């Protein structure tokens, strides 16, 4: 889950993850603040964000120790794949060993790097920091990991290449997004080893899994093939779906078989789940972020655009901030990191918060990007989102500036109070769980259901997880199926457990926050999350209300003041 939220591109050729322990001093941050991430009702604040780099400031938000290891020891060939997914991190399954909570507890990290530090050096600095503060010790090794073996059938359907042309696989034409859509590739002058390597990064091919060449076919080849985007929508006839394995078998005369192969991995010998205390003097030593815009022009949105839904907030290069057609509710929600609990808002104020729209053009003071910032952009069709164009800037860095603008220009005052908010209680009916091996890494992973399923399906696989941990993270694992961001464990089940949960995302029957209505009546076969919890795990999710903090606006001007 969560790969799309990591913005850290490295193109320099880096040394082996194990740095030589010679007399040379390892690169290190000048100072670093590591503290547990604050609880948040906003689910999006509970997933990894960053790393963000601004001048000497290096920042991670909501990062597990596993996240930090994967970033610190990421491969040298970092970048984007063909659909804009970041491929800079070391794969999670290639980090082996370590304490069971390696991927559970979340931390925020802010560090100061020496002036002029490169991205490559900051990775090594993060390795040093993990060794010093988390007592992390690692070494390189090999382990049998799942991979697809590319094998030759009785009659490969390939054309021998003359080796004179360019080598590679290209989409032809670019695919149209959407479940069930066809993805076409033309491969020219490709060895089977190169084709196996390319499969892992092809659009919706192996979900970033590894493929290895076991065809024994020598030379270079030309071939074309096409397959369907997996997880087809309900109503799509199975005959219309061409899986990747079917395409490779029938169109190329090859085969893809899931197996296990010896794979280079990073082995965690030891690590502490709690970092050593922060050094004194952090507030003065760390590079501060600006708390106000240098200049801001605030205007009501032109009447002819006031009928458009939604709004746009974008941070552009050089600190230019463009906000268009934004309601005061959108600005306040963004500035204070608020969210919605089910159908209940967490922000209460005057009605014009939802009807008055504003355009804002502002300038924020921004430090420069690292000196080795890659200039390459991802090879994806259509306009690029700002997060891909400017990957090192923390998009939330303008939030304090927005808060100051709302207070100064709109005279905003507010207070917090407790009000009943939607919540779910996890209870035990007839548990169908398996006792966990305490040595295994704790956590859950979600993945799409197999291609050809009658509806969009999510499979959540959990291991070595307590019910309290499962309840606390369920809103994150099941985005956005719950309708509540707070789940309380009342199962009374002690210890840790292994289990798998499979549910349809197109069926809301039984969801108390969806009125008990099915989204798609033509898909009666798929169990929704609430049904699956009871039938597959012997657990129940019951609707309730619990006190939660909401923001109440005491004063807000409908028209902004002049600066």
Image: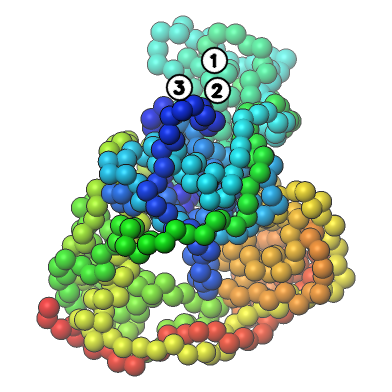
Q: Where is residue 454 in the image (x, y as percent from the top left)?
A: 69, 54
Label 2, on which residue? 195
Colouring used for the render: rainbow
Instruction: Return the residue found at the far bottom.
Output: 554
Disc on the earlier residue, 1 or 3: 3
* Image quadrant where one finds the C terminus: bottom left
**Residues at marks 2 and 1 touching, judged by CB atoms closer than 8 Å:** yes
Task: Indicate which disc residue 168 carries.
Answer: 3
Depicted 555 relative to depicted 342: above or below: below
Does residue 474 appear to the left or right of 297 in the view shown? right
Task: State the CA–CA distance, disc 2 to disc 3.
Answer: 8 Å
Q: How many numbered marks appear?
A: 3
Of the image marks 2 and 3, the number of the one nearer the N terminus: 3
Q: Which residue is drawn at 23% across and 84% down?
A: 410
Residue 282 spot, x, y in % from top left:
38, 61
Instruction: Judge left or right: residue 200 versus residue 93.
Output: left
- Residue at 53% of width from left, 90% of height from top? 419
* Helix, strand or loop under label 1: loop
Dot 3, how many residues are within 10 Å of its Cα: few (below 14), some (14-19), or many (20+)? some
Q: Mark 1 points at which residue?
A: 191
Q: Splitting the image into 4 quarters, where does residue 124 fall? A: top left
Q: Is mark 3 on a helix, strand or loop?
A: strand
Query: In the shown orientation, is residue 267 left or right of residue 293?
Result: right
Front residue of this view, candidates 524 and 556? 556
Position in image of residue 21 (x %, y %): 52, 29
Q: Which of the 4 image quadrants contains residue 371?
A: top left
Name the residue: 47% across, 74% down.
339
């Amino acid at each position: 889950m969560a790969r799309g939220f990591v913005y850290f591109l490295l193109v320099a050729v880096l040394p082996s993850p194990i740095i030589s322990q010679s007399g040379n001093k390892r690169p290190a941050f000048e100072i670093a603040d590591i503290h547990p991430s604050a609880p948040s009702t906003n689910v999006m604040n509970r997933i990894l964000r960053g790393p963000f780099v601004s001048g000497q400031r290096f920042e991670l938000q909501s990062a597990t120790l596993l996240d930090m290891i994967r970033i610190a020891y990421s491969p040298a060939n970092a970048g984007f794949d063909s659909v804009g997914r970041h491929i800079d991190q070391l794969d999670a399954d290639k980090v082996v060993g370590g304490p069971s909570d390696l991927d559970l507890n979340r931390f925020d990290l802010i560090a100061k790097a020496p002036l002029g530090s490169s991205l490559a050096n900051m990775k090594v600095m993060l390795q040093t920091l993990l060794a010093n503060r988390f007592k992390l010790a690692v070494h390189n090794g090999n382990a049998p990991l799942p991979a697809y073996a590319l094998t030759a059938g009785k009659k490969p359907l390939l054309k021998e290449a003359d080796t004179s042309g360019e080598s590679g696989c290209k989409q032809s034409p670019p695919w149209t997004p959407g479940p069930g859509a066809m993805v076409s590739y033309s491969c020219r002058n490709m060895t089977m080893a190169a084709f196996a390597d390319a499969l892992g990064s092809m659009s919706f091919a192996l979900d970033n899994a590894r493929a290895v060449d076991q065809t024994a076919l020598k030379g270079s080849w030309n071939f074309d093939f096409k397959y369907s985007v997996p997880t087809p929508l309900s109503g799509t006839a199975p005959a219309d779906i061409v899986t990747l394995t079917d395409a490779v078998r029938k169109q190329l005369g090859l085969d893809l078989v899931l197996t296990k192969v010896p794979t280079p991995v990073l082995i965690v010998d030891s690590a502490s789940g709690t970092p050593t205390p922060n050094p004194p003097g952090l507030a003065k030593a760390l590079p501060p972020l600006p708390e106000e815009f240098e200049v801001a022009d605030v205007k009501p949105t032109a009447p002819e655009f006031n009928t458009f839904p939604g709004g746009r907030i974008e941070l552009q290069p050089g600190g230019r901030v463009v906000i268009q057609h934004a309601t005061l509710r959108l600005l306040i929600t963004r500035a204070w990191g608020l969210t919605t609990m089910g159908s209940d808002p967490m922000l209460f104020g005057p009605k014009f918060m939802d009807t008055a729209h504003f355009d804002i053009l502002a300038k924020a003071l921004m430090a420069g990007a690292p000196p080795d910032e890659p200039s390459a952009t991802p090879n994806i069709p259509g306009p690029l989102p700002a997060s891909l164009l400017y990957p090192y800037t923390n998009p939330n860095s303008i939030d304090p500036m927005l808060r100051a603008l709302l207070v100064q220009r709109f005279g905003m005052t507010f207070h917090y109070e407790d009000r009943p908010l939607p919540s779910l209680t996890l209870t035990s009916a007839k548990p169908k769980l398996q006792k966990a091996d305490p040595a295994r890494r704790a956590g859950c992973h979600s993945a799409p259901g197999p291609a050809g399923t009658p509806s969009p399906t999510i499979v959540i696989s959990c291991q070595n997880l307590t019910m309290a941990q499962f309840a606390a993270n369920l809103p994150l694992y099941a985005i956005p199926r719950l309708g509540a961001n707070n789940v309380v464990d009342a199962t009374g089940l002690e210890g840790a457990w292994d289990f798998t949960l499979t549910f349809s995302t197109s069926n809301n029957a039984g969801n108390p926050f969806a009125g008990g209505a099915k989204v798609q009546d033509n898909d009666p076969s798929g169990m929704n999350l609430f049904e699956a919890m009871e039938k597959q795990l012997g657990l129940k999710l019951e609707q309730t209300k619990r006190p939660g903090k909401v923001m109440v606006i005491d004063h807000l001007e409908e028209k902004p003041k002049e600066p």
